Image (cartoon, grey):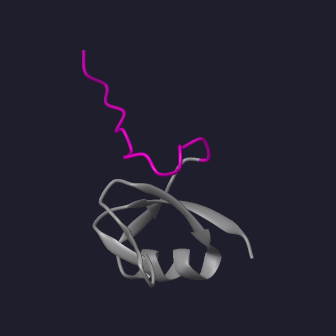
Amino acid sequence: MDKVKLILTRGAVVSPGVNAVKDEVIEVGSDIARNLRQAGAAKVADKDAKIGKPATIKTNKK
């Protein structure tokens, strides 16, 4: 089973007893990743995203 990095768009229960918060980067199996994405709870993260840290959004502010 392949591992997929996701950025959560809202709080979610990843597996029984494991909760994750909005903007957290998690790495899960492909089945769980598909379920979270279909539910609108996650988006695919960058390959270099650090797991477990809230995602930082890159902006082009001058």
Image mark count: 0
Q: Is residue 5 magenta?
A: no
Q: Which residues are magenta?
A: 47-62
Residue 27 x/y as whole percent: 57, 62
Q: 40 and 23: which one is in front?
A: 23
| Magenta: main secondary structure | loop
In this view, the residue farthest toward the left is 62
Q: 28 and 47: which one is in front?
A: 28
Left or right of 61: which side holds 41? right
Which residue is rendered at x = 54% and y = 74% of the image?
33
- In the displayed structure, would residue 27 be above or below residue 52? below
Which residue is rendered at x = 61% and y = 64% of the image?
4
Q: 36 and 21: which one is in front?
A: 21
Which residue is rendered at x = 47% and y = 51% of the image?
52
Residue 46 x/y as whole percent: 55, 47
Q: Is residue 56 magenta?
A: yes
In this view, the residue farthest toward the front is 17
Classify the position of the C terminus by image quarter.
Answer: top left
Residue 1 x/y as whole percent: 75, 76
Which residue is rendered at x = 63% and y = 74% of the image?
29
Q: Can you tell which quarter of the image residue 12 is in?
A: bottom left
